[in-house]
Image (spheres, rainbow, N blue to C red):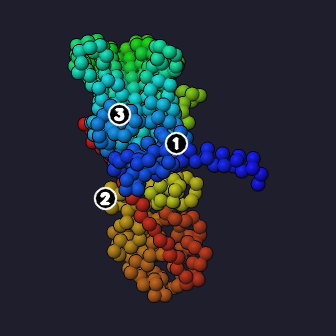
Amino acid sequence: MSRIAAIAVAGFLTAASYAATFTVNTTADTIDILPGNGVAADAAGNTSLRAAIMEANADGGADDIVLPAGTFTLSGANDDDLGISGDIDILSNLTLTGAGAGLTIIDANNIDRVIDVGNGAALLSGLTIRNGLVQGAGAGIRIGAGTSVTITNCDIGGNDTADNNNAAGGALGGGIFIEAAPLIGGGTAGSLTLSNSTIAENTCNDVGVAGNTEGGGIFNGGNLTIRNTTISGNVCTGANVPGSNGGGIASSAGTVTIQNSTIAANSARGAGGNLFRGGGTLTVQNSIISGGLGGPTNCGGTITSQGFNISDDGSCGLNGSGDLADTDPLLGELADNGGPTRTHLPTAESPAIDGGDDDNCQGTDQRGIMRPQQQGCDVGAVEVTPVDGSGAAGDDTDNDGIGDDFDGDGQPDDADNDGAPDAEEDENNNGVPDGLDDTDSDGTPDAADPDQQGGDNGNDNNGNDNNGNDNNGNDNNGNDNNGNDNNANDNNGNDNNANGNDNQDNANDNDAGMDGLDDTPQDCGECGNGADMLLLVVPFSLVGAARRRRRR
């Protein structure tokens, strides 16, 4: 190798070494003992969140930091911009990825804000950001001038900006603060792209006489793009009532663009319980603005509509194509409706269903579900999936975003393999879709019920025992026992008809009714040859777990 080539290779390796992946392996809040050496390690040799951030700031590269599930509680004094204690200070390009909102939690424990992006570009994904407390601006996340931040699949909640001074200033951006461009010396404003996330239950509070509070959820002084996001239950309060604006979002400059999002149940003592535009532009499309408490109720300032929005009052001045003003969107409570973050699920009668603009809706909803699901895209952050068994292969009875799949094979259930999902069929004519039959009325569909998966202690699905009677034309509501001999001594060489032919009573057991597994004249290729068919049925349970996060 020539000397020039060797130098080139060495230079490449040196440059590459500055971009690293740091995998955090402890929830302890410990510092990096030697920032800049390429190793994120505390005194014990572990990689903490803080150590990884410090090393990433020092190496100057575009680093990846991977966080496992767990709660990372911050400690130490505040007002530190070097990342040694208090909030997490991001000063270079990096990606911070958690295991999922609700799984990976960064908790400031009310000692400081949670994250301060002071330089570079940052991508934050799969995190819960909570319990930030700061005097001034941005208790959850502060996005400085000149920085660019992308947030996706995150839950930012329970953060509080406060200002107890009587001087002018105030508390801005309880959840997120985006800084404007400097007035002197030039430069650019901060920018944020926010998607598939929830900003909820953040507050801004100022008890000073002269102070203002704006943006309980988000305060924007730069550029903000919001897609497939829920902003709910954020509050702005203050002694200076006319200055307490924008419980959900307040914008003083720059641009705000909101698409396929739900802004609901936010409140402010001043103008715009949900949205307030004090400067710049604020544009909404395919979005829901509802349940705001303020004066006026939902919106303050001029809001620009690009169409297909719903507001439950007239304060937003919606006049675009497809807009519905003074219309209740009929939303459910903020809850776990599937997906990584909490949402407001429209009820079955909601005008948001199929009410969006198909040409301009997002490809998926906040939960990652494809749009559209029915006749058209839905308005807001959530795309409602069909639940009535009326003809779509993606019928989703529990609305968790997964087509009914009680047998756990990854496909919508089609027990008789005729191409029609069970949710569309009722072959036993009991008025209930086959996929939802619940013979023993225990609340669990037969296909997911261990009691109905073969045998049931000698009792078939109609309560008749199977001591030699099962395969004489009675096939348990179309379930032919699938190789379970039900006390008929089938595995001793005697099948249920003592003739060596298992399940061959009529040679067409499964064409007389849906047996849940096959659609052929014979149950298997070996039937009629004295060989039984053994099928292992693994019950698939549907478990819904409502996640509740601790809030301040």
Instruction: Residue 413 in the image: state x and y as whole percent.
Output: 50, 56
Q: Residue furthest right?
A: 2
Three-letter code for the amino acid on which mark 2 is drawn: Asp
Residue nearest the observer in this picture, 152 or 403: 152
Q: Residues within 10 Å of mark 2 (few under 14, many from 20)?
A: few
* The disc label shown at residue 442, or none: 2
Instruction: Using the rendered image of the protein, determine whether residue 26 is visible from the camera's viewpoint.
Output: no
Instruction: Using the rendered image of the protein, determine whether residue 443 is visible from the camera's viewpoint.
Output: yes
C-beta proximity under 8 Å, tags 3 and 2: no
Q: Quadrant of the C terminus?
A: top left
Spatial CA distance of label 2 from label 1 is: 60 Å
In terms of image quadrants, where is residue 311?
A: top left
Per the image, the residue denoted by label 3 is 80
Per the image, the residue denoted by label 1 is 59
Pointer 3 or 1: first along the chain: 1
Spatial CA distance of label 3 from label 1 is: 20 Å
Instruction: Residue 83 in the image: state x and y as whole percent.
Output: 39, 38
C-beta proximity under 8 Å, tags 2 and 1: no
Q: Residue visible at 41% across and 56% down?
A: 45
Q: How many marks?
A: 3
Three-letter code for the amino acid on which mark 3 is drawn: Asp
Instruction: Residue 271 in the image: state x and y as whole percent.
Output: 33, 14
Q: Is label 1 in a helix, a strand or a loop?
A: helix
Q: Quadrant of the N terminus?
A: bottom right
Asked if 409 appears above or below 490 in the picture, the reply is above
Pointer 3 or 2: first along the chain: 3
Spatial CA distance of label 3 from label 2 is: 58 Å
Q: Is label 2 in a helix, a strand or a loop?
A: loop
